[in-house]
Amino acid sequence: MSEEILVEIRDFLSPRGFECAPFKVQWYNEVVQSAFRLRYPPDTLAVSIISTPSMFEKTFKPFVASTDWTNRSESPSDPLDRCIHEQLEEASRRLADRGFNVDIIHDYDLDFTRKPRILVQTAGHVSGQAYYYQRSHVTASAPWPTNKPIYGVSIHPKYGGWFAFRGVLIFRDVAVELKRREPEDVVSTNEKRIELLEKFNSSWEDFQYRDVVPVEERYSDEQKAYFAATPGAARRKLLGLPSLNDVN
Ligand code: B12
């Protein structure tokens, strides 16, 4: 049954520039603190979704061109969030038509205590999609004071850091037997891991951490300019959209 689901999701999302990797809720719940656990039975099927560099051209730009941006009441109001939201909704609708109940958790969803509802880097790691490098992976001579927070970063074997996690689909009623796939450890030396974490934490704006390993594809200049712009008015302007203050 999980094969049928994966074929259907990939059929829809892969040509649009997304990549999907399945995991069992148990694998995720085993590593996160209890406050972050997903409240589903251990064998429940979940799928981690990332956008690859080509999503911008294959899906986002056509979406921008074909959407009526004068309607302010649509949610989410951010164009990219709205685009991803619609793609995941459509993928789930297709599965609902086949009788599957799907819960969508987006990377930006928060619970009532304002904690992220899903830790997408952990989900990506346990699904085998992208290795999540954390401070604990640096074994010796870490250059940072112990009280400095060092945020972890995931690196994909094909896209390095040139991708984004978009969320997780959870199939409430589907219990699976899945074979676990380990993520590829592409940043394997201590020295490289320090360099990666340093760049991600201190100078992420220049995109350099994304090139820590050789990659097959990276963001276009247009896409880089879009992500470098502050979310909100500056991004809408780059897309040629009316500002939220101008439209009625
Ligand atoms: C809050 C947040 C921030 C905050 C705080 C960062 C943080 N990591 O806490 C701020 C605003 C600083 C931030 C900044 C950035 N962020 Co941010 N952020 C998030 C967000 C929404 C939640 C992260 C969070 O709160 N984690 C909670 C902590 C407790 O989780 P944790 O440290 O991973 O701890 C867990 C693991 O250790 C796990 N665990 C324990 N043992 C083990 C063992 C194993 C093997 C595993 C796998 C896990 C595991 O259990 C712990 C929890 O109990 C995520 C999206 C998401 N929903 O996950 C994006 C996210 C982490 N951010 C991202 C990015 C890109 C950025 C920025 C570059 C800005 C940007 N968006 O372009 C900067 C870079 C950091 C910097 N230098 O400032 C990306 C990272 C992509 C990647 N390749 O990894 C994410 C995943 C968003 C996305 N949609 O792709 N961010």
Image (cartoon, grey):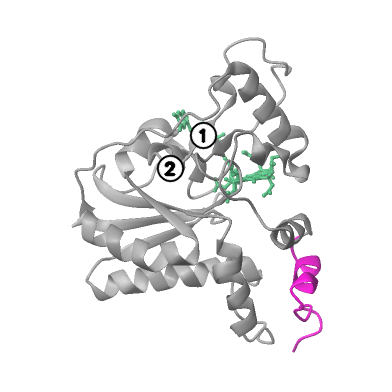
Most foreground residue, 170 or 213: 213
Residue at left offset 66%, top offset 22%: 194
Name the secondary structure under disc 2: loop
Name the secondary structure under disc 1: strand
Give me the disc on residue 214. none
Does the stretch in magenta take in 82? no
Q: Which residues are magenta?
A: 231-248
Is label 1's Cβ within 8 Å of ligand 1? Answer: yes
Q: Residues within 10 Å of mark 2 (few under 14, many from 20)?
A: many
Task: Point out the residue furthest to the top here.
Answer: 140
Give me the disc on residue 132. 1
Q: Quadrant of residue 57?
A: bottom right
Q: Residue 149's spot in the image, x, y percent?
A: 68, 28
Above/below status of 219 relative to 59: above
Asked if the residues shown at circle 2 and circle 1 are in contact, with their CB atoms under 8 angstroms apart, the answer is no
Magenta: main secondary structure equals loop
Task: Inspect this view and state whether residue 119 appears.
Answer: no
